[in-house]
Amino acid sequence: MVAFGKKLRESQIQEWKGYYINYKFMKKKVKRYREQIDVGAQNRHNVLRDFSMLLDNQIEKIVLFLLEQQGVIAHRLSDIGQEHQNLLQQQPNNSKTYELQEDYRNVGRDLLRLLHFVEINATGLRKILKKFDKRFGYKFTDYYVKTRANHPYSQLRQVLRHVGIGAVVGVLSHNLADLHDLQQCQGSYISIYDQPSYAHQDPILESIKVAADRLSNSTNFLQFLGRHAFIMQEEMLPSPSEEDLIDERYHFMSLLLNLASTFLYMVNTYIIVPTADDYSLNLGAAASVCGVVIGSMAIAQVFSSVYFSAWSNRSYLRPLIFSTILLLFGNTLYALAYDLNSVVVLLTGRLFCGLGSARAVNRRYISDCVPLNLRMQASAGFVSASALGMACGPALACLLQTDFRIYNLTMNQDTLPGWLMAIAWLFYLLWLWICFKEPTFKTEGNLVPYQAETRPVEVHIAVGNGYTQPLLLNSEAKEVDEDGEEENDDAEEGSEETQKPVTSIVLAYKLLTPSVKVQLFVYFMLKYAMEIVLAESSLVTEYYFIWSTSKVAIFLACLGLTVLPVNIVVGSYISNIFEERQVLLTSEIMVCIGILLSFHVFIPYSVTQYVGSALITFVSAEVLEGVNLSLLSKMMSSRLSRGTFNGGLLSTEAGTLARVVADGTITISGYLSESQLLNTTLLPALLICISSIVATCCTYNSLY
């Protein structure tokens, strides 16, 4: 892996060389601090104070230069603007118009250079803080970021923000659109402010927007929603060659088929929830067995997520076909269980449905085969398809309240969900077979195998059998600096931050920091709470309120429909006002309040109390999921961005395990006492929620 110090030197703009973070100097200081502490020549307190001052000076140098360059750009825009005004007062001149357009674009290119300057320095700061923590074994990063980022006069904030950039982009977009209109329409004036639908989006503006968003990690609704998919992004943009490869592999209909698979699977999951207790009773089992019926799909999904993720290293079409066949077979068994009068067949059918969960393939296709400029939209589509399926499942169950026979097969509210989904998966299988286009996979003779796709930071040579090896192997991180001192730049990071995908769940777990582990626990908690609310709804409402299946289905559908509106509010407004960690902790507290309000303490237990508390719990958990996955995507190791054991798989396993435990709790509690079912299932949820709040408070300062 090419060391960051070398990459920094190669990426520097030479005339700005003196204004970049002095990464090599600070790296040597960290090494000497360690040596001084080891021999007793220095104490930790003095080291922290000295290193903090060094960082402050480096950041001050970067910020002052940033402000100076922004002033230069503003002065250039003012001069070009004066020429622009003179042109408007004269007869249209195409050559002068073109010249002004190029002047504006040159300003845009200089702005891109400035954004790249800030991004390189922000990466350098993060890396040197990480190196310091690793050398000394404690979290200096937490202390430094907390004391600097939370101060009203913090200069650290300026490195991670782009104050003034928006104003420059506004001037460029307005004036380029004006000149484009002048050139095309011979003087007719259309203002982008008067007619927002009219806009001339110059390529340079799109490049600036991508760079600024990557730097600021901005949170509009689309990005906030897309983060629910937990499709991890790599730290730096892929190289042009990688982007060309992804463009070649992208196929819109194939993406649509993956989104359809996501939608149908979520419908399949929730279409049986309103009737699972009734189905269990009709087969001679206890009503609380519905927990096992619902949860058996999640149990199988724990295993299917792993083998489907591994299979998608070699193909997308074959695992999707296999998944669809399993779902078709599983739903048929689920429907036949009624006439066979067998709980075993019922559970087997649901297990097959869980074994057919191809969400890992759907997520992987978006991550690997959708171009970067469309990936966020595709991720948002993935989440929207899931939310829509979650709402449509119970809604469809509400429409299946009938009872008739076809030959010897019973068609009623219990069996029709199985038959309906079997037919849906049959049609999907035909659509998949006809329209899906298998992406091109790299072969062994290529430079980098698809399974271990990395950024092109190594030089490779080919040997006789076509296999390729790094030219310098591990020695490439070692180089001699200008002082004649051998520099093993980022040797520690070489093993940790290599871009090779993780090859085992154990290695993936070792890469998780305490903060990431806490956030995975938070994800477990929110999925547990949501599953308790959804899975036991038919039991609770029938016992306390004697609700019909239709009422339960409508209630669950309404809960599912809150997903998108809630994310619009949070993604567009709340996340732009408050820090993600603040929203995270507040949401956890609200989930806790919702669970507390759900307990049956007062008699009688009212519909208002149940519906209100369920709504608070579910909506708060939805808000929590967005910020939780957003924080996870920022804090997880880049090695977990691709491969079989990726970050998405870890979060899926955590959420699936939560559903399994929640459904098992419902079944066990139902056997103890139906009257105590509600409180018995809520108590573990409350304890887990309180534990997650405490854990979040303990790691709060590291949630950046």
Image: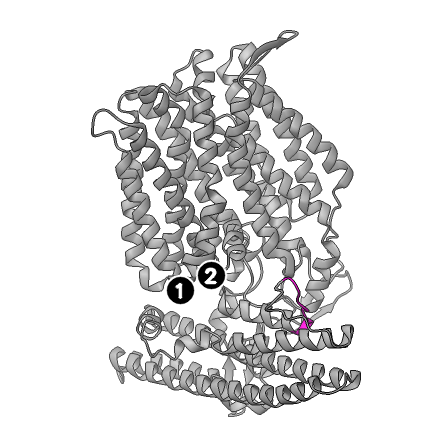
Q: Quadrant of the C terminus?
A: bottom left
Residue 533 higher or lower than 629, as above or below: above
Q: Check contact, mark 2 vs mark 1: CB within 8 A.
A: yes
Give the residue at x 44% y 72%.
Answer: 126
Q: Residues within 10 Å of mark 2 (few under 14, many from 20)?
A: some
Q: Quadrant of residue 212?
A: bottom right
| Residue behind mark 2 | 634
Camera sees residue 586: yes
Assess whether residue 198 is covered by the magenta stretch.
Answer: yes
Q: Nearer the viewer, residue 181 or 313?
A: 181
Q: Quadrant of the N terminus?
A: bottom right
Q: Residue 689 appears at what percent x and percent y?
A: 30, 44
Q: Is residue 309 left or right of residue 242?
A: left
Q: Residues within 10 Å of mark 1 (few under 14, many from 20)?
A: some
Q: Amino acid at mark 2?
A: Lys
Q: Residue 522 appears at what percent x and percent y?
A: 37, 48
Residue 250 higher or lower than 420, as above or below: below
> Going by the picture, which residue comes out furthest to the top?
408
Q: Residue 279 appears at what percent x and percent y?
A: 47, 17
Give the residue at x 78% y 37%.
Answer: 434
Give the residue at x 66% y 67%.
Answer: 199
Q: Nearer the viewer, residue 456 or 601?
A: 601
